[in-house]
Amino acid sequence: MPLLLSGRGFRQDLERAGAIALFAPLEGGAETRLLRRLRAAGYRAHLTSARGLGDPEAFLFQLHGVRPPHLGHQSVGRGAAVGEVQRVMPLLGVELEGQAPILLWLLEGQVLSTAELASLVGLTRREPRLKMVVEMGGARALRWQPLEQLIAGV
């Protein structure tokens, strides 16, 4: 259990790799402890789901457009049949201010394609302060590996 008490080995692996694939027991708890340890180490953490991420670079770093869901009978006179585009702020816009390291914790990462996972690895290389933990599913025991190794093994 010393791993869960300090989280030092996890943090060192995260800082070395930039992006880590995490497999956690389904009963939960271990990943929350690791997240708490990273926050205590100075990381500005942001949790979000990988579902609906779209283009990761635009979603995380750029002002981008989002169309509202179609809710049935609506007027198509103004905004076409798919609705008007709403401008949305980047998800990590506020966290990029300052010098603190940034942690993006993505839940349900198993829905991402290999290309999307590779783009996440590329983002951590371009922005050295950004570190990512992608939960890739359940396991009997807590384990992780660099996301780049997981992509290469697919």
Image: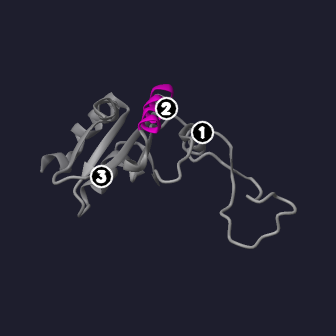
The structure's colour scheme is one colour
Q: CA distance from mark 3 to mark 1?
A: 26 Å
Residue shown at the point (73%, 58%) measured from the top left: 82
Q: Earlier in the sequence, mark 3 or mark 2?
A: 2
Residue occupying the far right of the picture: 77
Assess whether mark 1 and mark 2 are in contact (beta carbons under 8 angstroms). yes
Q: CA distance from mark 3 to mark 2?
A: 22 Å
Q: Residue 152: percent from the left, percent from the top? A: 31, 29
Which label belongs to residue 42?
Answer: none
Which label belongs to residue 123?
Answer: 2
Q: Residue 126: percent from the left, percent from the top? A: 50, 26
Q: Quickly name the residue at label 3.
A: 137
Quadrant assignment, res 76: bottom right
Residue occupying the far left of the picture: 1
10 Å crowding of disc 1: few (<14), some (14-19), many (20+): some
Name the residue type under label 3: Gly
Range shown magenta: 114-126
Dominant secondary structure (helix, strand or loop) of the stretch shown in magenta: helix
Secondary structure of the residue carrying tag 3 is strand
Q: Residue 98: percent from the left, percent from the top? A: 55, 37
Q: Quickly name the residue at label 1.
A: 61
Give whichever of 69, 1 is nearer the camera: 69
